[in-house]
Amino acid sequence: MNEPVLARLQHLMTLREEVESLAGVGPWTPAADWCDGDTHLELHLDVPGVQPGSLELLEEGDTVTVAGQRPEGTRLLHTERPSGTFRRTFTFPEPVMAQSGQATLSGGVLVVKFEKRHPTINVPVRGED
Amino acid sequence: MNEPVLARLQHLMTLREEVESLAGVGPWTPAADWCDGDTHLELHLDVPGVQPGSLELLEEGDTVTVAGQRPEGTRLLHTERPSGTFRRTFTFPEPVMAQSGQATLSGGVLVVKFEKRHPTINVPVRGED
């Protein structure tokens, strides 16, 4: 990489920090997916190193909040992994049955399954012959 | 948030993408820590959702390379979680014994432990009485 590109990169890295501070992105915002099923919606959240006992889930109206934490590493020579607490609130992409959330934590991924209020129903199509 | 701040934020988000493309950050760069022990160095890598069988580790001189993958989600309504392959090469922060790496994967965190070539030795100090 030549000098102008490096200088530009450094400038952009500073701006990136500004983005994160403006956006209110804390030190840890676990990445999330919403997956669509015929009868259920699933929220998948990357929470490596978080113990099940330190996770909290709260359904409230059309939102679900997930909070948790993991301890800071010790004697760190180099660190990129976020630590401490996180809290994220998600609005359901479509209506779900109240109190239907079921959560499992496996391989550092939290999966919360919600029953859809309006499931997709496959209507079989019969031929005439 | 008022309009000028939102506009600034949007501008910065675009720049952030430019940063990532300039920096060569791919879709998935798992976060890593190096932890220092008296006799060992540990590399900790966040790899939630990665199966042990899809991880590869390669020690080569003063570097260790970790590669792996996880499948893309299906029927995604919203996605933030990176998928596909990753490959990262790390230079050891200090000399380690060749072929001493021992890896474990637990809770979505890969921990690779290397024996230091120059362990820290605590020399007991005796008093005169």
Image: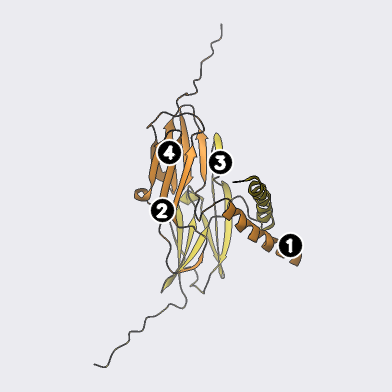
Chain colours: A yellow, B orange
Which chain is indicated by disc 4?
B
SS at circle 3 = strand
Badge 2 amino acid = Gln
SS at circle 1 = helix
Which chain is indicated by disc 3?
A
What is the number of the mark on residue B69?
A: 2
Residue denoted by label 1: B5
Numbered marks: total = 4
Residue denoted by label 3: A79
Furthest-bottom residue in this view:
A128
Marks 4/2 same chain: yes
Mark in front: 2 vs 1: 2
Badge 3 amino acid = Thr
Among the two numbered marks 2 and 1 on one chain, the one whose residue lies closer to the N terminus: 1
Q: Residues within 10 Å of mark 3 (few under 14, many from 20)?
A: some
The picture places residue A50, in percent across and down from the top left corner, at: 49, 49
**B129 or A74, which is in the foreground?**
A74
Among the two numbered marks 4 and 2 on one chain, the one whose residue lies closer to the N terminus: 2
Badge 4 amino acid = Val
> Circles 3 and 2: CB distance less than 8 Å?
no
Residue denoted by label 4: B112
Quadrant of residue B10 within the rendered picture: bottom right
The picture places residue A62, in percent across and down from the top left corner, at: 56, 70
Q: Residues within 10 Å of mark 4 (few under 14, many from 20)?
A: many
Q: CA distance from mark 4 to mark 2?
A: 17 Å
Q: CA distance from mark 1 to mark 4?
A: 43 Å
The picture places residue B28, in percent across and down from the top left corner, at: 49, 53
Badge 1 amino acid = Val
